Image (cartoon, rainbow, N blue to C red):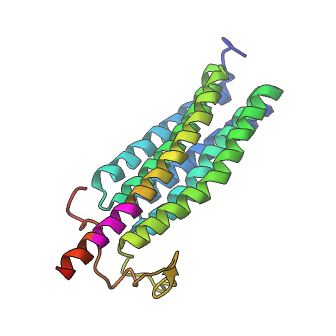
Amino acid sequence: MTDETLPPVLDWAVSISMALFYAAMALAFVRILIGPYLADRVVALDLLAVLLVGLMALYTVQTGYSAFLDVAIMLALVGFLATVAFALYGERRHMQQLERRRTRDER
Amino acid sequence: MIDVIVALLLLCGGVFAFGAAVGVYRMPDTYIRMHASTKTGTLGAGLMLLAVALHFGELSVGTRAISALVFLLITAPVAAHMIGRAAYRAGVRLWEGTIVDELAGKEISGEPVQAAAARTTTSEPPVEHS
């Protein structure tokens, strides 16, 4: 399927969809910037990873190289692990701060 | 014919992904934002992967696309659940229009939690950058 020109229907669909994906990623970046909580940023990062998976699928259709699909699979994996790690980190940080506050109150 | 179906799937996927991002940008609190990003975002990316599988029509490509899709569908709820639990435990505030907070007064893994609406929080106040 490489080096073939796409039929016009698909060409249009790929262009429009790509524009939508770029706009979506811009919005997710804005949410990462304005927060306000750490959890909001983690949610936006998770969405960004999922959007990247979709974008890689789009590149696969556009270029005809199926190797982009492997990139999509790896991005899905890394995105999931990053989200879980961030959630655990936030929870543990909260527990540590509670502990610190408790020992401070006892003194 | 197959091209038209693939084009429709691509457009639907793009629209859903954009909708997820608009939801994450516009919704009022963390939990509702997570709601938008998890379901709609996964559907958007999943439709794109389905379009790839249909477009190529080869066994090797289709298997990889479908496996990526299944992986996304399995991991998205787990990730969302973990973020939600961490956010609730860290005291991220609910939107003031929230009607019911079913976790208030219950326990999460053996430790009682206060209602997120009325408690001291150790998570950063909304103005401070972490």
Which corner quadrant holds the N terminus of chain B?
top right
| Majority secondary structure of magenta residues | helix
Kindly identify the residue that appears in the image at 62 percent across and 33 percent down: A57
Q: Is residue B122 positioned above or below A18 on the image? A: below
- Residue reaching furthest to the front: A107
User: B127 or B103, which is in the foreground?
Assistant: B103
State which region is magenta: A91-99
Q: Quadrant of residue A42?
A: bottom left
Kindly identify the residue that appears in the image at 46 percent across and 51 percent down: A85
Residue B67: x and y in percent read 73, 40
Q: Quadrant of residue B71?
A: top right
Can residue B122 be seen here? The reply is no
Does the segment drawn in magenta span residue A65? no
Q: Is residue A36 positioned above or below A100 on the image? A: above
Does the segment drawn in magenta span residue A92? yes
Residue A94: x and y in percent read 34, 66
Say whether residue B114 is left or right of residue A51: left
Residue B98: x and y in percent read 43, 81
Residue A82: x and y in percent read 47, 46
- Residue reaching furthest to the left: A107
Kindly identify the residue that appears in the image at 74 percent across and 39 percent down: B66
User: A50 or A25, which is in the foreground?
Assistant: A50
Which corner quadrant holds the C terminus of chain B?
bottom left
Q: Is residue B3 positioned above or below B47 on the image? A: above
> Number of marks in the image?
0
Q: Quadrant of residue A41?
A: bottom left
Can residue A101 be seen here? The reply is yes
